[in-house]
Amino acid sequence: MSTTSFDKFQKRKLISSYFSVTLSIALILFLLGTLAFVVINSQNLVNHIKENLVVNVYLSAAAKETEINQFQKTLAMKEYTKSVTYVSKEEAAEDLMKTLGENFVAYLGDNPLQNSIDLHLKADYVTEEQLADIAIEIKGATFVDEVAYDIPLVSLLNDNIKTISYYMLGGCGFILFISILLINSSIRLSIYSKRFIIKTMQMVGATKRFIRRPFIFNNIKLGMIGAVIAIAALTACMSFLDTKYPTIKLLSNVPMVTAIFGGIFIFGILISWLSTFFATSRYLNLRTDDLYY
C-alpha cells in the first residue's frame, strides 16, 4: 500500500471513529432527554389530576350573599387555593338533571340541593393530612354546613404516586448508569486505536497532561456535537407531538425545556471529558508490552 493510500485509509478510519463516537453520544443523550421529558411531564400530569380534585364546601341556607362573597374572596387568597367557584343550588340542580336525564325538582316539588363553593387545591396540598386540616379550618365559618371530598381517592392517588415514583427513580438510575457505560465504552474504543501513539509520545518525553489535552479537547467537541444533534432531534420530536396533540404543549414550558436541553449539553461535555481522561490515563500507565493485549 502506498503512503497516499495509507494516509487515506487512516483518514477514513479516523472519520469513522469520530462518527461512531458522536452518533453514540447523540443517541444516548436523546434517550436521556426523552426520559427527562417523560419524568417531568408525568409529574405535571399527577399535579393536574390532584388539582382537579374538588373540595365541596356546602353553605347553609341562612348564609347572606355578602358573607358568601367575602368568604369566597378569603378562600381565594389562601396559600393552598388553586381556584374557587361559587355554585348556586339552581346551577347544581341543572347539572344534576343533565346527568340524571330527568327533572327531579319537579318530581320532589322542591330543590333539596345547597349553595356551595367548589374549591380546587394546589397539588402540594392534596394529601390526607393537609386536606383534613383545611376542612377543619373551613368548617370554622358559622355558615358552612359541610366540607366534602373523596377521601379514598386521595389516599389511593397518593399511594400509587409513591409506588410509581420509586419505580421511575430506579428506572432512571439504571438507564443513566447504562448510558454512562455506553458512552464511556465508545470513547475508550476510539482511544484504544491510538494507544501506540499515546505510548510513543510518552516515550519521547511528553508529559501526561500534554498527551491528554488534544484527546480531551477533541472528544469534548464530539460530545458537544452529539449533544446538539440530540437537542435538535428532541426539538423535532416535541414539535411534531405539539402539532399532532396541541393540548400537551411540550415546548411551551420554556424553563423546563431550557433546563433539559442545558442538562443534555452539560452532560455531553462532562461525560466526554471524564471518559477520555480515564481512558488515556489507562494507556499512559500501561507497559509497552501490555499494549498488545
Image (cartoon, rainbow, N blue to C red):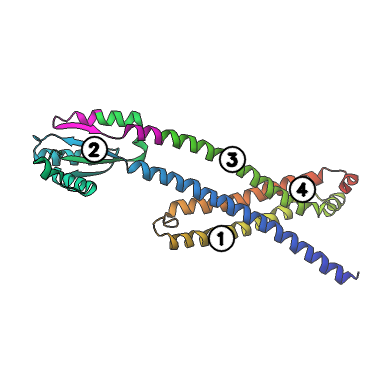
Instruction: State if disc 1 and disc 4 touch (CB < 8 Å).
Output: no
- Label 4 – label 2 distance at C-alpha: 66 Å
Give the quarter of the image for residue 86: top left
Q: Which image quarter holds the N terminus?
A: bottom right
- Where disc 1 sits, the SS reads helix
Q: Earlier in the sequence, mark 1 or mark 3?
A: 3
Tell me the crowding category of disc 2: few under 14, some 14 to 19, or many 20 or more residues within 10 angstroms, Cα based.
Answer: some
Instruction: State if disc 2 and disc 4 touch (CB < 8 Å).
Output: no
- Label 1 – label 3 distance at C-alpha: 23 Å
Instruction: State if disc 3 and disc 2 touch (CB < 8 Å).
Output: no
- Label 4 – label 1 distance at C-alpha: 31 Å
Q: Residue at x 60, y 56 (%)?
A: 227
Residue 83 located left or right of residue 242? left
Identify the residue position indicated by label 2 in the image. 56
Closer-to-camera residue (281/55): 55
- Where disc 4 sits, the SS reads helix
Q: Which mark is residue 280?
A: 4
Q: Earlier in the sequence, mark 4 or mark 3?
A: 3
Q: Earlier in the sequence, mark 4 or mark 1?
A: 1
Q: Earlier in the sequence, mark 4 or mark 2?
A: 2
Q: Residue at x 37, y 37 (%)?
A: 124
Identify the residue position indicated by label 3 in the image. 173
Identify the residue position indicated by label 1 in the image. 233
Q: Earlier in the sequence, mark 2 or mark 3?
A: 2
Closer to us: mark 4 or mark 3?
Answer: 3
Q: Which residues are magenta?
A: 136-157
- Where disc 3 sits, the SS reads helix
Residue 139 falls inside the magenta stretch = yes
Q: Amino acid at mark 1?
A: Ala
